[in-house]
Image (cartoon, rainbow, N blue to C red):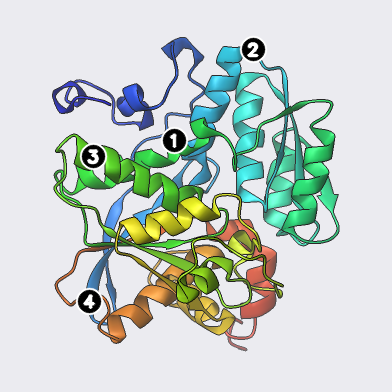
Amino acid sequence: MFDLPNLAGRAANLWRYQESLGINDSKNYVSFGEGPTPLTPYQLNGREVLLKLDYLRPTGSFKDRGTAVMISKLKEWGVAEVIDDSSGNAGASVAAYAAAAGIRAEIFIPAYTSLGKATQIRAYGATLIKIHGGREDTAEAAWAAAARSFYASHNWSPYFLAGMKTMAYEIAEQLNWKAPDWVVVPVGGGSLIVGLWQGFLDLRACGYVTKMPRLVAVQSENCAPIYEAWKAGRQSVHCVQKRQTAAEGIAISDPIRAKQILQAIQNSAGISHIVSDDEVWYSLKLLASKGVYIEPTSAAAIGACSTLLSSGVIGHRDIVVIPLTGFGLKATDKIVEHCSDTWREPEK
């Protein structure tokens, strides 16, 4: 774990927490100069919350935290070619960092993935393979292909998870080494909520913060295996039959990190919450009207937080952080499809 006095002389980027990231030699860092993302006050339901603008990372999503560390480790190991499967954002991130590292990448995505994400993956020079079916079918196809190449799965890699922990470190540092009361997180595969949980565990163990924030695992009502398990008090997740949802990034019916996600909720005295597609689209347009343009998956967390504030679950004096995980331009085709009527230019 890093020592607080050492941070004063380090650059303001992800690698300032280097002791916690597992890379042996800094010459192997694969980086686009990932600086800290803003923690910005925002009025939601008449209450101030803090938006963690992680859609401002180099490829437009929070996944860059994990990918930077994972690809750096693969470079250190001398890996020349990788395969990954993704709903879009992780695939784009792996494609970008692999390109910077000189590593060939083959990315599997569901055929329904937003055009912006698919185009981004291709633009980085990766081989893109679209799989008809769900997110799970995509993972199975990548697993089969891994017989001939290194499977750089962001869902399995401990180095990817180490990168996710940096969001907890960064939030605490931005709050002058204080943990917020709540962090409201969209949850699909679970890398972010598990990374936040483990990161705050690190900070608490070192005495850098005095408490663990309560974590909210937000899911779409059309695909909510974590919510269903939490609601039933189960320690494991049952695979669910999912329906199409605006929040494509969290539409995972059987998440690999399911047990860890449930542990993160339980250990933090947290909760799970579901949102409808109508809440997602309303929240997306609400933030856009204030200058914050995010993809629908990110908007799910805004919708959940709005309800939890209104219902009094989150107290009126509580410090609340909402990570905004993906940039709106990634889902332009989906946003145009669902918002074109309300955002149409007035006739002259």
Q: Residues within 10 Å of mark 1 (few under 14, many from 20)?
A: many
The residue singled out by tag 1 in the image is 163
The residue singled out by tag 2 in the image is 78
Q: Residue furthest bottom?
A: 347
**Mark number displayed over residue 47:** 4
Verify CB contact (< 8 Å) between mark 4 and mark 2.
Answer: no
Q: Residues within 10 Å of mark 3 (few under 14, many from 20)?
A: many
Q: Which residue lies at the image location 65% right of the left edge and 78% below the top edge?
A: 338
**Mark number displayed over residue 67:** none
Q: Residue type at mark 2? A: Gly
Mark before the other along the chain sequence, 1 or 4? 4
Q: Residues within 10 Å of mark 2 (few under 14, many from 20)?
A: few
The mark closer to the camera, 3 or 1, is 3
The residue singled out by tag 3 in the image is 203
Q: Is residue 20 left or right of residue 91?
A: left
Marks 4/2: CA–CA distance: 50 Å
Q: Residue type at mark 3? A: Leu
Q: Residue type at mark 1? A: Gly
Quadrant in the rendering for residue 105? top right
Q: Which residue lies at the image location 18% right of the left edge and 34% below the top edge?
A: 206
Q: Which residue lies at the image location 36% right of the left edge and 26% below the top edge?
A: 15
